[in-house]
Amino acid sequence: MLEVPKEIKGLIKDGAIFYVSHSGGKDSQAMYSILRKVVPSEQIVVIHADLGEVEWEGVQEHIKEYTEHEVWVVKAKKDFLEMVEVRKKWPSAAYRQCTSDLKRGPIMKFIRNDLKKRGATIAVNCMGIRAAESAARSKKDPFRFNKRESVNGRVQRSVYDWLPIFDLSTKEVFQVIEAAGQKPFWAYKKNERLSCVFCIMGCVNDLRHGAEQRPELYKKYVDLEKKIGHTMFMKGREPISLEDYVGIKAI
Ligand code: SF4
C-alpha cells in the first residue's frame, strides 16, 4: 500500500482532481491501481495520449479493460513520423520532443480545459515515472508544484506533478498488477518498455520485437531515416542505421 504524502492528503481534502496519465504500460497500470485505493473515485480522471500508428495496437483496449473510469483520449495535431520528417531529426533522450509535443502538451491542454469545465482549480498530474528506470529519472522530484502550468490571476489554477510509484522496483510494479487480478499488456512477454513500438530509448530486444510484430511500421522508420539522413541511434559517436542497430532488414 502506498504511503500517501501529507501534501497529497491535503490536496485530496481540498478537492484536487487527480489526472492519471495512462500509456497502457505496466507503470501506468500499477499507478492507477494504487491510486484507486487512496484517491476518492470522483477525483480521478484517466487520460491517454494517443500516439496513432506508432503505438502498440490494442493498447487503448487494454487500458479500458482494466480501468473503471472513463478513459479520455487526447491526440496532438501532428503525429510522430510527421514531426520527425518536418524536423529532419529524431528526438533524443536529451531532447524528447516526442514526449513534450505528443504527450505532455495534449495532456496539459486537456487538464486546463477539464478543470475549467468542472469549476475546479487544483490539478495533480500523476505520472508513472520511477527512479529505477534511469539515473536521470532517479534525480526527479516525486512531488512538485508546477509553476509553469499554474496561474494566479483572473483565472486560478494550481498544478502539481506527482510520481506516485517513484520508489517502486520493476518487480513490485508487476506484483501490484498481479495483486489487482490484472495482466500487463501482452507485449511485456518480450518487452521491457511499451508506448511507441520503436522508442528512441528502446533496447535492442524491444526494437527487435517491434520489427517482428509490426514489419510495415518498421519499414516506415527505416525509410524515414534514409529520407531525412538522420538515424535514431548512435553507436559510440557514430550514427548507426536502425536496420544495423536492430539486426533485421526491413521488407
Ligand atoms: S515512447 Fe519513446 S519515442 Fe515514443 S514518445 Fe515516448 S520517448 Fe518518444
Image (tube, rainbow, N blue to C red):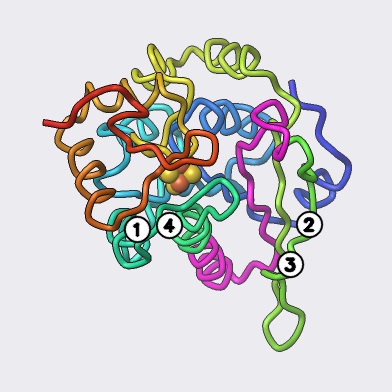
Which class describes the residues within 10 Å of circle 3: few (<14), some (14-19), or many (20+)? some
Apparent side of residue 190 relative to residue 113 in the rendered image (left or right): left
The residue singled out by tag 4 in the image is 102
Question: Which mark, residue 84?
Answer: 1
Seen from this angle, which residue lies furthest right? 6
Q: Earlier in the sequence, mark 1 or mark 2?
A: 2
Query: Which marked residue is nearer to the observer: mark 2 or mark 3?
Result: 3
- Tell me residue 63's x, y (percent): 39, 33
Real-space Cα distance between discs 1 and 2? 42 Å
Which class describes the residues within 10 Å of circle 2: few (<14), some (14-19), or many (20+)? few
- Tell me residue 178's x, y (percent): 53, 11
Q: Amino acid at mark 4?
A: Leu
Query: Which marked residue is nearer to the observer: mark 4 or mark 1?
Result: 1
The residue singled out by tag 2 in the image is 14
Which residues lie in the magenta part?
A: 108-137
Tag 4's secondary structure?
Answer: helix
Q: Are marks 1 and 2 in contact (CB under 8 Å)?
A: no
Assign ligand 1 to one image quadrant: top left
Which quadrant is the C terminus positioned in?
A: top left
Tag 3's secondary structure?
Answer: strand
The residue singled out by tag 3 in the image is 158
Q: Earlier in the sequence, mark 4 or mark 3?
A: 4
Count how many numbered circles sit on residues in the image.
Answer: 4
Real-space Cα distance between discs 4 and 3? 23 Å
Apparent side of residue 159 relative to residue 41 in the rendered image (left or right): right
Which quadrant is the N terminus positioned in?
A: top right
Real-space Cα distance between discs 2 and 3? 12 Å
Real-space Cα distance between discs 2 and 4? 31 Å
- Tell me residue 144's x, y (percent): 79, 53
Q: Is mark 4 within 8 Å of ligand 1?
A: yes
Question: Which mark, residue 233?
Answer: none
